[in-house]
Image (cartoon, grey):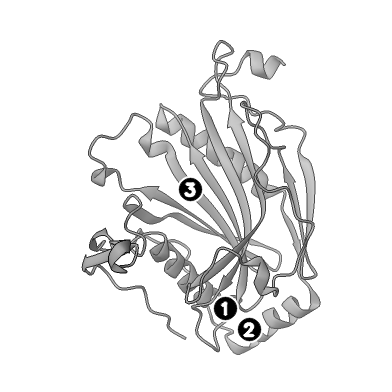
Amino acid sequence: MLKRLFASRRRPYIPGLNTPEVIEIDLSCTKLRMQLPPHHDYEGFEARQAPIPQVNIYDPSIYRDSTFGDPFSSSVFIKRGWEYYGPIWRMQPVASTTFIAVVEQVNCLPEGMSCFNPSHLEQALLRLCYRMGPEKPRQAVKRAPINWAIRQSGDTLWVHYEIHKDMSKIHVPSPFSASEYSSYVVTPLDDRHYLRLMFHNYGYAPVEQAIMCMNALRDRVCRHIELEFSLSARTQMEQARGRWPDARISSQRDPENWVYPKWRDGDFGKGEPDIVILKPGSPPPPFVP
C-alpha cells in the first residue's frame, strides 16, 4: 500500500507488479514460460483472453481472423491489461498497457526462406510494419520501425522495435499523443512461424516520463521469458544455420520512408472494397532470398 500511497507520474504504481503470475504455454512442443503481472482493470472488466496452455501452431483453425491471401495470420493466446496509477487522489489510472501474445504465421514468406535465417526474419518484420502502415492507410500514419534492437539469449534471437504515430501528420495532437505507441518483441518458432509479444501503450504527459515507465514494464516482462525449443524447431534452426552460415540481422534500423497512398472509403453498394486507392504509395518491401 505504501507504493500506492506515494505513487506519482514519475514513479507510477502498477497493481500486481511484484506478484507476477507464472504462465507456461506449450506451442507445439516449444515451451514458453513468462512471469506476467495479473490483469487489472479499474472498471472491473476481465482479461480479453486468458492464457491458452496448449497451442497447436499448425492448426489452421486457430487463425480465425485471417482471410485468404493475407500476408500474415495471427492467433492470440494471451491478452490482458495493466494500469499505471499516479497520485493517490486520482482514482483512475493515468496510463495503461494492453499486452497481447500471438503466434504469427508468415504466409508471404517465399518458399525456401526461413524465419530462423536472421536476414529473412528481418525482411518478414519489415513486411509486417508495411502491413500495419501504408497497406492500411485508414489508420494514423505511422513511423516504423523505431528503436530497433537485437537481443540474444542463448539460442534465442529476440527482435525489439516500436511503431509510433507520425506526429507531423496529426493536425491537433494532444499533450500525450506521442505517448501512445506500440512495442513489439519477436522471436522465431520455426521456419514459417514466430512469437510476437505486443505492448500497446496509452500514456500521459510528460511524455518522456510515461515512455520511460511503460518501457520499464516491457523490459521487466522480457527479462523473465524462457523459451525451450521443440526437437523439430531445433532441427530447423540448425538446418538454417548450416544453409546460411553468414546470415545476419541489422543491429539497428532507421524508420522506413514509405509514402502512404491517397485513398477514399469504398462504396459497398457498388461492390467496391473497403478502401479504394486513388494514387498508389510505396510498394511492399520485397523479399530477397
**Do the residues under discs 2 and 3 have CB atoms within 8 angstroms?**
no
**Do the residues under discs 3 and 1 have CB atoms within 8 angstroms?**
no
Residue found at x 50% / y 40%: 201
**Do the residues under discs 1 and 2 have CB atoms within 8 angstroms?**
yes
- The image quarter containing residue 159 is bottom right
Residue found at x 58% / y 61%: 186
The residue wearing badge 3 is 182
Going by the numbered disc 1, the residue's amino acid type is: Asn
How far apart are labels 3 and 1 at the CA level? Answer: 25 Å
The answer to whether residue 172 is above or below residue 256 is above
Residue found at x 63% / y 82%: 241
Provide residue 246's location: percent of width, then percent of height: 54, 82
Helix, strand or loop at label 1? It is loop
- The image quarter containing residue 91 is top right
Provide residue 129's location: percent of width, then percent of height: 42, 62
Dot placed on the residue nearer the N-terminal end, 1 or 2:
1
Q: Which mark is residue 240?
A: 2
Helix, strand or loop at label 3? It is strand
Going by the numbered disc 2, the residue's amino acid type is: Ala
